[in-house]
Amino acid sequence: MTVNMKTLLKKLRFDSWALSFLAFIIVFPLILLAAKNTLNVTPAQQTHFQETTSSETNNPPSGGTLEKVENRQPLSATDAKVKAKLLALLPDGQKAGIIHQSPNIRVEYILSLDQFNVEIVNTNIANAKKEGNAWFLEQGLSQKGLCDLPLRFYLNNAVFEQMPDIQDTFNPLPDGC
């Protein structure tokens, strides 16, 4: 039995094309399904995102967090040293991430914003916020430094879903700022 090289190459090209097509038909729906599952957002989360986004970008309050980021005041030499000490708490080799957590709060540094965020993780918001303020002050930061970092408090999704009306009165700035 003689095998013609041209026929063999044509068959091989057809088989490769067919295999690629089948792989695409199988993999593409799986990718879409995975993307759909990771992008599920509850209506409460969507509302929270819309309210937060519109209030911070369209109508930033005087002295609000957006203004603090855009019009930063320089830190004093002492507060700059404390900030460096706080950044040294990041896990080895990381330039952003969680630097402190407790049952009430999680403190995270966001490199792209050069900002500290304090996530409130339970419904005792006033105590959690006091704890976050106190933690920064205990690290050696002055009250002015606390206001100038910038530092932002926010409610995690579980807390927000339990207390959706709190968004109207919740102040994301540290106490005294």
Image (cartoon, rainbow, N blue to C red):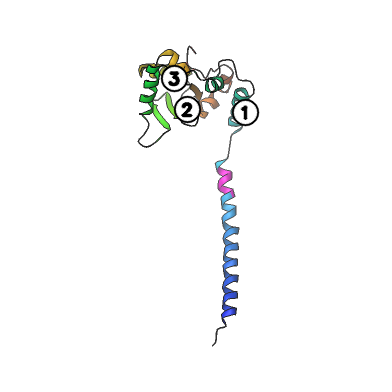
Amino acid marked by disc 3? Ala
Q: Residue farthest to the top? A: 176
List the single residue furthest toward the bottom: 1
Question: Which residue in the protein does label 2 denote?
Answer: 114
Helix, strand or loop at mark 2: loop
Amino acid type assigned to the residue bearing label 1 in the image: Gln
Name which residue lies at 58% across and 70% down: 15
- Element type at marker 3? helix
Query: Which residues fall within the magenta stretch?
Result: 32-37
- What is the spatial separation of the Cα atoms under label 1 and label 3, in whole angstroms? 24 Å
Q: Is residue 10 visible?
A: yes
Q: Residues within 10 Å of mark 2 (few under 14, many from 20)?
A: few
Q: CA distance from mark 1 to mark 2?
A: 23 Å
Q: Kindly identify which residue carries mark 3.
A: 128
| Residue 4 picture location, percent across and down | 57, 83
- Which quarter of the image is occupied by the N terminus? bottom right
Q: Taking 57 as reference, is 158 left or right? A: left
Position of residue 89 in the picture relative to residue 167 (left or right): left
Residue named by callout 1:
50
